[in-house]
Image (tube, helix red, strand yellow):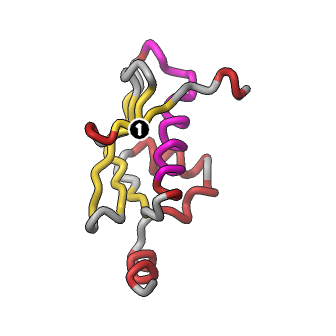
Amino acid sequence: MATENKPKIVWNEGRHRFETEDHEAFIEYKMKNNGTVMDLVRTYVPSSKGGLGLASHLCVAAFEHASSHSFSIVPTCSYVSETFLPRNPSWKHLVYTEESKILKSSI
């Protein structure tokens, strides 16, 4: 997708989500484990905006945020676990496991 067509995704910290500028599409999260784990609980894209790749852009924004803040991700949302991660395996290193919990606590 060309850069000029990439939607602007904004972090709405107060509502615990990343969303499109018009607030219509979003990925919602809950912070866990004393703020070190981001549980992606819901992705929503209205049918009027389906097929534009917004869900994937929302996921990338959330994963980039998690990466830059050294958070792990719990992919509770079925879109994240069943569609986004299989299509984008380079992000799997951020997925929370018991091993990542042990590694982070030893740092």
Q: Position of residue 25 (x, y in %)?
A: 40, 26
Q: Position of residue 85 (x, y in %)?
A: 54, 51
Q: Specify the segment rendered in magenta.
A: 48-65
Q: Looking at the magenta stretch, what is its main secondary structure?
A: helix
Residue that extends furthest to the bottom in the rendered view of this protein: 106
* Quadrant hosting residue 106: bottom left
Using residue 57 as the reference point, say whether residue 37 is left or right of it: left
92 lies above or below 10 = below
Q: Position of residue 83 (x, y in %)?
A: 52, 43
Say which quadrant the C terminus sits in. bottom left
Residue 76, placed above or below residue 47:
below
Task: Residue 4: tell me if it is visible.
Answer: yes
Q: Residue furthest top?
A: 48
How many numbered tags mark residues here?
1
For label 1, the crowd category at 10 Å Cα-Cα, with few meaning under 14, some 14 to 19 and many 20 or more, is some
Relative to 68, say whether 24 is above or below: above
When the figure is inspected, residue 100 is found, relative to residue 51, above or below; the finding is: below
- For label 1, the SS is strand
For residue 61: magenta?
Answer: yes
Image-based side of 90 in relation to 21, left or right: right
User: What residue do we see at 36% from left, 49% from top?
Assistant: 40
- Depth check, front residue: 73 or 76: 73
Q: Who's the residue at 41% across and 18% down the image? A: 22
Is residue 13 covered in magenta?
no
- Which residue does the image show at 42% across and 66% down from the upper left? 96
Q: Which residue is mark 1?
A: 11
Q: Nearer the viewer, residue 59 or 35?
A: 35
